[in-house]
Amino acid sequence: MKLTELVGMIDAQLQPWQFKDYAPNGLQVEGKEEVKTLVTGVTASMALIDAAIASQADAILVHHGYFWKGEDARVVGMKRARLAKLLAHGISLLAYHLPLDAHPVLGNNACLAEVLGFAVAGQCGEQNLLWHGSVDQALTAQELTQRISSRLGRDAILLGEASWPVERVAWCTGGAQGFFDDAIALGVQAFITGEVSEQNYHMAHERGVAFIAAGHHATERYGIQALGEWIAGNAHVKVKFVDVFNPV
């Protein structure tokens, strides 16, 4: 299909204009007019670009793209190398950040809830990025951490007491440790996100709410896969997800 048609199709589904984001959503690097093969992944790293070239892809679709607010605007070093390789092979880069986090069906938060067995009760907070609900059975904080580690294939970090009971949870994928206070205000017993900061340890113990850091990359693998599967089912495009390893 035409690149412009693919971008329009995704834009209509994710509605990026509704978000105040830290990077441009949609087409970031323009390549070939026609897209027959699309590679999806979490981050537009050089490893993902190389995988796309090996797959003879015409375009790459990611959650973490380029041109973030506050970064050095010069096209030098790592940025130059990535852009040069994309342009040399005529590969387009499409990226959707917060719109992919928040989407009620294809989004990272929605997909993580399904993977972890959470019943969604609602969305709230900054741009509706904080989700909350309940687990499918009563667990201790340690049991929930073990479930998360097993299902995501990564050792999650538990801050708080292992024996604390957990029924109500809040979550936000990626680097959302700053939402911990907002999660606590919801009356939950555990908050799950990707990354952790030093102060989260003290907050967890002093407020009596478990904090579970499950990995930025690990919590954000599922939305981009769901979006790719949706594209494959609704357009004449071959879609391949590439999970480039990242322990963070």
Image (cartoon, grey):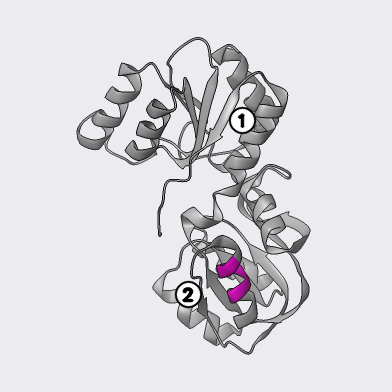
Question: Could you say where residue 238 lies in the image, as x and y percent from the top left?
Answer: 59, 24
- Is 162 in front, or is 247? 247
Q: Position of residue 73 (x, y in %)?
A: 28, 32
Label of residue 121 in the image: none
Q: Residue at x 30, y 31 (%)?
A: 82
Judging depth in this view, the residue of 101 and 39 nearest the camera is 39
Q: CA distance from mark 1 to mark 2?
A: 32 Å
What secondary structure characterizes most of the magenta part?
helix
| Residue occupying image coordinates x 67% and y 71% | 185
Side of 48 where 164 appears, left or right: right
**First along the sequence among labels 1 and 2:** 1
Q: Residues within 10 Å of mark 2 (few under 14, many from 20)?
A: many
Rendered position, 137 above or below 80: below
* Span shown in magenta: 146-150
Residue type at tag 2: Asn
SS assignment at label 2 = helix
Residue 27 against residue 225 in the figure, above or below: above
Percent coordinates x, y for residue 196 in the rendering? 45, 68
Residue 186 appears in the figure: no
Determine which residue is flagged by label 2: 200
Around disc 1, counting alpha carbons within 10 Å, would you say few (fewer than 14), some (14 to 19), or many (20 or more)?
A: few
Q: What amino acid type should be assigned to the residue bearing mark 1?
A: Trp
Q: Quadrant of the C terminus?
A: bottom left
Q: Please name the residue that numbered disc 1 is placed on.
A: 17
